[in-house]
């Protein structure tokens, strides 16, 4: 497990200059994908880059679709400078969905599959976090920061966060109280001076000071 974690971290670090682009139809770039991205990305994200965006390499994933049908393949763009990759991602995140005519374009970091799976697992817990009134934030590559009642914690494993939320939920549930008579529990009539009622809860047992009312002879 430790070796797998190291390999995942190495893969993420080696892709830190990469951006994954989704939504660009096949062929929209003409014959030069690199030049097209250099021109369109600053316009889409409304950034001014000095020096201009420089790419080490760009390519589409998957086979080329000649008929233009189906979902277009993602584009992986490797920028020469890490700062420019961060600038594009931050601008896209701040603006929300990017529009190219009627098309919705999305930009994301190019994480490893293991990191993407962890991020999805963290994000799947958002409804529970909101329900329990926990403030949270997902940071790269895959760590969840939370704060509850002024106390902050960081989680690197979604399962650890799930266990933590289970405990919070247990604490938030109201304690159930059940009233039983001693006769209910024992199944035999009460004797004089025996306690009449027992209060049973999740955390304690309380015996009332009332005594059984014994029939007079």
Image (tube, helix red, strand yellow):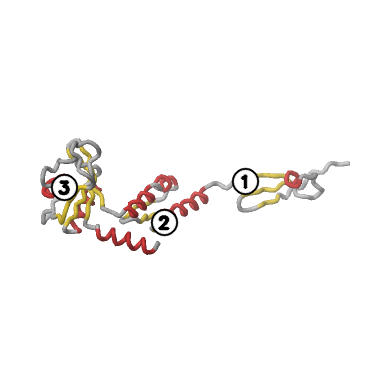
Residue 95 visible, this orientation: no
Question: Where residue 19 appears, x then y in whole percent?
Answer: 22, 52
Judge from the rendering whether residue 52 lies leftward or rightward of residue 174; answer left or right.
left
Label 1: element kind: strand
Residue located beneath label 1 in the image: 177
Q: Nearer the viewer, residue 45 or 156?
A: 156
Q: Are marks 3 and 1 in contact (CB under 8 Å)?
A: no
Task: Tell which tag, 3 or 1, sits nearer the viewer.
Answer: 3
Mark sitting earlier along the chain (3/1): 3
Q: Residues within 10 Å of mark 2 (few under 14, many from 20)?
A: few
Q: Residues within 10 Å of mark 1 (few under 14, many from 20)?
A: few
Residue located beneath label 3 in the image: 41
Report the quarter where the N terminus lies.
bottom left
Task: Tell which tag, 2 or 1, sits nearer the viewer.
Answer: 1
> Which of the labelled discs sits on residue 150, or is there none?
2
Question: Where residue 53 appears, x then y in whole percent?
Answer: 13, 53
State the separation of the CA atoms marked 2 and 1.
Answer: 30 Å
State the separation of the CA atoms marked 3 and 2.
Answer: 40 Å
Mark sitting earlier along the chain (3/2): 3
Question: Where residue 106 appears, x then y in whole percent?
Answer: 24, 45
């Amino acid at each position: 497990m430790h070796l797998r974690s190291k390999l995942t971290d190495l893969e993420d670090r080696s892709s830190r200059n990469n951006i994954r682009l989704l939504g660009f139809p096949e062929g929209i770039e003409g014959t030069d994908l690199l030049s097209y991205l250099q021109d369109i990305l600053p316009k889409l994200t409304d950034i001014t880059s000095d020096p201009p965006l420089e790419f080490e390499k760009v390519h589409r994933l998957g086979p080329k679709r000649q008929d233009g049908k189906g979902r277009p393949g993602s584009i992986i763009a490797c920028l020469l400078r890490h700062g420019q990759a961060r600038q594009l991602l931050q601008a896209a995140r701040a603006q929300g969905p990017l529009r190219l005519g009627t098309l919705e374009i999305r930009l994301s970091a190019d994480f490893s599959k293991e990191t993407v799976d962890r991020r999805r697992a963290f994000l799947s817990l958002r409804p529970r976090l909101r329900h329990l009134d926990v403030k949270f934030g997902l940071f790269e590559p895959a760590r969840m920061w939370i704060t509850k009642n002024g106390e902050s914690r960081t989680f690197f494993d979604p399962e650890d966060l799930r266990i933590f939320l289970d405990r919070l939920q247990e604490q938030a549930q109201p304690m159930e109280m059940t009233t039983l008579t001693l006769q209910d529990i024992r199944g035999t009539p009460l004797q004089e001076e025996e306690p009449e009622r027992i209060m049973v809860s999740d955390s304690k047992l309380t015996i009332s000071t009332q005594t059984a009312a014994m029939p007079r002879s």
